[in-house]
Image (cartoon, coloured by chain):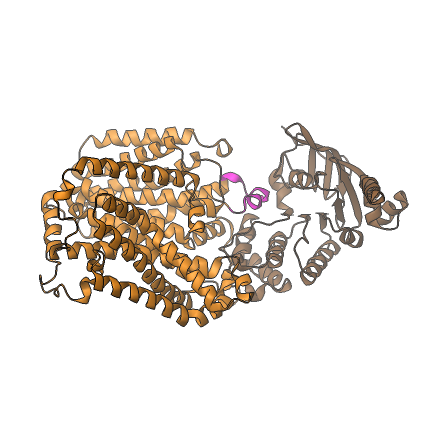
Chain colours: A brown, B orange
């Protein structure tokens, strides 16, 4: 079976076309389509169970869609998986690392998986470890790392092979203020250098401050999309939190509950 | 104790209950069967001199078992239990915290030996041997206190030298060796080469019979050496000394180790991985690429797995008597070749189970552009290369020492490769991958049919190697059987690796 090709002349970093996925007859993602440009940070927001993680996992090739297609820089995730994965990095919300390895050993393995030349990977690993303040811990095993250190190492693993698109599922969960700032700075620099980022987060302030565009997903469908300003204008609200609650319909019941108290 | 009990899985608990029920029934039946004979026997007479030696040896075995359990329990209760910080921050004095932990260690040390001691005590008491029954119980508890004290000293000392991880590895290996000690002793006849079973047993019996007070240079009955054996038969003075000694040693240990315990916890307990390990270069990084990076990762994880180390050691120890028993007729020529094929295949199975079936970051592998087939090949190689190299070295040594002829060695080489490579392939049949830490958990047993096919394959190859030592043609039949077993197992491999 030949891979379908995108129809537009500009190749988007990510192009989702009518993705569907059900689990046990219940739709997790239903007809989701969206595009992310190179050099753009796209925040995917939604309430719990909205289908964010399923979407991310389908893009990363970890979950097979029932129908629809995902393209990464024009490469079909389903039919041209290796080329798509070559330019992709996926960082789950709870990264699973190898506890018995040290940070450089982990990065060596990841670089090997992406086929990087050892002479190129070693200095890049050193640069990343220094940049993320992990260099002084390079002789320690990962099992002794704090949550924040593990998250930073996973980020280093995602960055080491210089991906052109990063999928980040709740990348700031469990990080302290300093580590969170470091990760945000790293992402900003990555996007400024031309990389594309799709991130899911429950911290709306992060999405508001960092994202060029925000997609709000509910019931497995994209219910709103635009810049933070566009979303505020569309909902007539003053904060992204209010806009989010308004768009997802989560504000009404809570207001009633509060009123009944 | 509760923690130990909770550590047992459902199957183990059920097995324990079944064993205890069978034992109680057995004792009751034995009592009624012997009821008429028992009153005429001198069951509670003082223990004769000739019995002191064997009793002392059995006590020594139990004590090593308790010591090994105490070291493992010390590591867990002193350094890795989650509520330690809370306890040390509470108004309780650290000495009380250590004392309570040390009592926990004593209970943990008593438990494995208790599985043998408690039923034995029960049997002795039911049969009217009250001196042995009561004395054994008191000795068991005193020995647990002594073992826990020794375990605490040993653990804190080892942690100081080796770190928490190193001590855990050492404890696993020591535990495996202690556990295998009794088994090896029972297999003495198989090790004793050309001598018959009866002669071997006689030699052991003769050696044991001279280990007695006043025999073969050993001191008399009143010496300190025999004190534990006399205490177990409820002799008042030895028993009193033993109980007082164990309580004193335990109390002194808690008092003396408190400071070291609190400073040790602060240094090492929290993030155990922060102990530096010297193999990682301190200067500039040097990486390997592609398949070599995967192989290095797998070998590092294998080398840092204390459970695998102790399991491998046990596997080799338990296979040795079998090997010598089976190949006794053929001498070193048969034993050497067969042993190399069997041991390397068996070792490969353990390694392949870890490299191919256990994976801590499956999402990382699936999201990488490397093909699953290439990854599986690397993981397969990671299991096969070390064991094949071990086998090659062993065959070379045997050939150089003249134990194997050139043609015999050349015939064994493909068997070695087939044994290691084939065994690793058979692992692909097993259930879905698990996390590395869960790889050897008892509730993740290999399917029965896979066990049978693996045994057929490894047994068939070993038999072929044995037949090759004498040029027997029946070796071709066993080789065919091994190949069929491999083919069947491989055809039944998981659908995701087809």
Q: Is residue A48 visible?
A: yes
Q: Nearer the viewer, residue A199 or B378?
A: A199
Q: Nearer the viewer, residue A228 or B51?
A: B51
Q: How many marks?
A: 0
Where residue B304 sits, quadrant-wise, is bottom left
- In percent of width and height, residue A127 lies at 61, 62
Does B326 sit left or right of B106 as displayed? left
B369 inside magenta stretch: yes
Q: Nearer the viewer, residue B482 or B374?
A: B482
- In percent of width and height, residue A180 lies at 69, 58
B263 up-or-down from B140: above or below: below
Q: Is residue B196 visible?
A: no
Where residue B339 sits, quadrant-wise, is top left
Does B13 sit left or right of A192 as displayed? left
Does A47 sit left or right of B254 as displayed? right
B263 up-or-down from B13: above or below: below
Where residue B242 sits, quadrant-wise, is bottom left
Location of the C terminus of chain A (image quadrant): top right
- In percent of width and height, residue B119 lies at 29, 45
Which residue is at 34% across, 61% downward? B145
B205 up-or-down from B253: above or below: above
Which residue is at 51% across, 61% downward? B84
- In percent of width and height, residue B30 lies at 21, 37
Q: Nearer the viewer, residue B305 or B173?
A: B173
Location of the N terminus of chain A (image quadrant): top right
A229 inside magenta stretch: no
Range of residues picked out in magenta: B360-373
């Amino acid at each position: 079976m030949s891979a379908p090709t995108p129809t537009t002349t500009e190749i988007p970093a990510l192009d989702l076309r009518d993705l569907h996925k059900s689990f046990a007859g219940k739709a997790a993602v239903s007809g989701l389509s969206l595009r992310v440009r190179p050099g753009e940070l796209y925040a995917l927001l939604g309430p719990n169970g909205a289908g964010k993680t399923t979407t991310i996992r389908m893009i990363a090739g970890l979950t097979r869609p029932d129908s629809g297609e995902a393209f990464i820089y024009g490469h079909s995730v389903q039919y041209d998986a290796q080329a798509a994965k070559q330019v992709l990095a996926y960082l789950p919300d709870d990264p699973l690392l190898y506890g018995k390895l040290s940070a450089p050993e982990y990065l060596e393995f990841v670089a090997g998986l992406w086929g990087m030349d050892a002479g190129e990977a070693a200095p890049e690993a050193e640069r990343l470890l220094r940049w993320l303040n992990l260099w002084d811990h390079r002789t320690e095993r990962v099992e002794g790392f704090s949550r924040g250190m593990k998250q930073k190492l996973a980020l280093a693993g995602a960055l080491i092979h210089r991906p052109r698109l990063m999928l980040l599922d709740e990348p700031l969960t469990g990080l302290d203020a300093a580590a969170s700032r470091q990760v945000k700075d790293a992402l900003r620099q990555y996007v400024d250098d031309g990389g594309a980022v799709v991130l899911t987060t429950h911290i709306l302030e992060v999405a508001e401050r960092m994202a060029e565009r925000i997609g709000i997903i509910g019931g497995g469908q994209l219910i709103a999309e635009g810049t933070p300003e566009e979303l505020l204008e569309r909902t007539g609200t003053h904060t992204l939190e209010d806009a989010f609650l308004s768009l997802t319909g989560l504000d009404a019941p809570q207001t009633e509950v509060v009123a009944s108290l | 104790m509760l923690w130990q009990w909770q550590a047992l899985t459902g199957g183990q608990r059920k097995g324990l209950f079944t064993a205890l029920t069978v034992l109680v029934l057995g004792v009751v039946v034995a009592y009624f069967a012997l009821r008429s004979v028992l009153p005429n026997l001198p069951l509670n007479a003082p223990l004769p001199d000739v019995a002191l030696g064997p009793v002392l040896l059995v006590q020594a075995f139990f004590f090593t078992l308790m010591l090994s359990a105490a070291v493992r329990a010390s590591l867990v209760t002193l350094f890795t239990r989650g509520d330690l910080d809370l306890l040390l921050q509470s108004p309780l004095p650290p000495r009380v915290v250590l004392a309570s932990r040390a009592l926990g260690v004593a209970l943990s040390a008593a438990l494995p030996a208790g599985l043998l001691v408690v039923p034995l005590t029960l049997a002795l008491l039911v049969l009217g041997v009250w001196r042995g029954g009561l004395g054994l119980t008191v000795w068991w508890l005193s020995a647990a206190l002594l073992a826990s004290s020794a375990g605490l000293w040993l653990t804190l000392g080892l942690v100081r030298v080796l770190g928490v991880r190193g001590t855990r590895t050492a404890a696993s290996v020591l535990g495996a060796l202690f556990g295998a000690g009794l088994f090896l002793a029972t297999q003495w006849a198989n090790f004793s080469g050309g001598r018959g079973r009866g002669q071997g047993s006689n030699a052991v019996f003769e050696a044991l019979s001279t280990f007695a007070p006043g025999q073969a240079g050993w001191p008399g009955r009143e010496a300190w050496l025999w004190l534990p054996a006399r205490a177990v038969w409820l002799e008042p003075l030895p028993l009193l000394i033993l109980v007082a000694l164990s309580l004193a040693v335990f109390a002194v240990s808690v008092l003396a180790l408190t400071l070291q315990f609190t400073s040790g916890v602060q240094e090492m307990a929290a993030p155990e991985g922060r102990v530096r390990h010297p193999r990682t270069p301190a200067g500039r990084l040097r990486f390997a690429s592609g398949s070599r990076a995967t192989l290095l990762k797998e070998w590092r994880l294998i080398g840092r797995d204390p459970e695998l180390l102790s399991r491998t050691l046990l596997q080799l120890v338990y296979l040795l008597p079998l090997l010598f028993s089976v190949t006794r007729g053929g001498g070193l020529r048969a034993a050497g070749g067969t042993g190399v094929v069997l041991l390397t295949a068996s070792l490969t199975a353990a390694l392949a189970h870890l490299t191919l079936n256990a994976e801590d970051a499956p999402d990382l592998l699936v999201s990488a552009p490397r093909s699953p087939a290439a990854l599986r090949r690397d993981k397969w190689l990671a299991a096969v290369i070390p064991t094949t190299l071990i086998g090659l070295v062993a065959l070379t040594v045997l050939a150089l020492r003249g134990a194997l002829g050139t043609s015999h060695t050349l015939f064994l080489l493909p068997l070695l490769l087939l044994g290691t490579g084939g065994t690793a392939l058979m692992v692909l049949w097993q259930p879905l991958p698990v996390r590395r830490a869960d790889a050897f958990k008892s509730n993740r047993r290999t399917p029965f049919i896979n066990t049978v096919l693996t045994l057929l394959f490894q047994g068939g190859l070993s038999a072929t190697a044995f037949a090759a030592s004498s040029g027997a043609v029946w070796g071709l039949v066993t080789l065919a059987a091994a190949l069929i077993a491999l083919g069947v197992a491989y055809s039944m491999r998981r659908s995701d690796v087809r």
